[in-house]
Amino acid sequence: MLRAAVEWDKRFEISDVELRRGGVSYTIDSVRHFQAMFPQDELYWIIGGDQLPQMNLWKNIAELAGMLEFIFLERPGHPAKQTPDIPGLRLRRCDGHLIEISSSELRQRVRQGLSLHYFCPQKVITYIETHKLYH
């Protein structure tokens, strides 16, 4: 589905490193992988604003904070009221159009036979329909 969503935009590249790794995958492991692959590049990690309160619980968060900059998008119902107190944390808010729907709600819409239009790209909708997902 991710390929279907972004195939038209050559700025995106998809990695399956976490799938190939198998088992539990931690952000720190993926960042180490991408840092080794792209040692000259500056890395960014995009998260939902609802993750900010839990960042103190992330594995190796102090090390992670020094490795990259986090970009967060606010999520409806989860306003970013305060940033976590993590030394060295670089955090940037990204403004965008907020859609008040979760992935669970999208799956529920499919089960109920409701439209996904305006919630995800047409090619993703076609993929879900073709593979009869979430019924």
Image: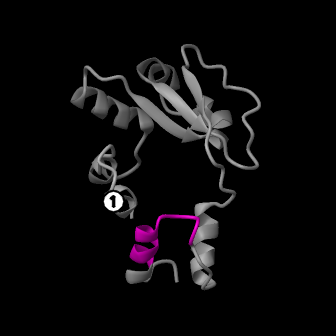
Position of residue 91 in the picture relative to residue 37 (left or right): right
The segment highlighted magenta reads 117-128
- Residue 58 picture quarter: top right
Q: Is residue 30 above or below residue 38?
A: below
Q: Position of residue 82 (x, y in %)?
A: 74, 27
Look at mark 1 in the image and give the residue it sits on. Answer: 3
Position of residue 65 in the picture relative to residue 31 (left or right): right
Return the residue nearer the eye: 7 or 59.
7
Residue at 68% in and 34% down: 53
Magenta span contains residue 3: no
* Amino acid type of the residue tagged 1 in the rendering: Arg
Return the residue nearer the eye: 126 or 61.
126
Q: Is residue 7 above or below residue 38?
A: below
Q: How packed is label 1: few (under 14 Cα within 10 Å), some, or many (20 or more)?
A: few
Position of residue 31 in the picture relative to residue 70 (left or right): left
- How is colour applied across the structure in the image? one colour
Q: The residue tagged with tag 1: helix, strand or loop?
A: helix
Residue at 44% in and 81% down: 129
Magenta span contains residue 121: yes
Residue at 69% in and 57% down: 100
The mark tally for this picture is 1
Q: Position of residue 51 (x, y in %)?
A: 62, 40
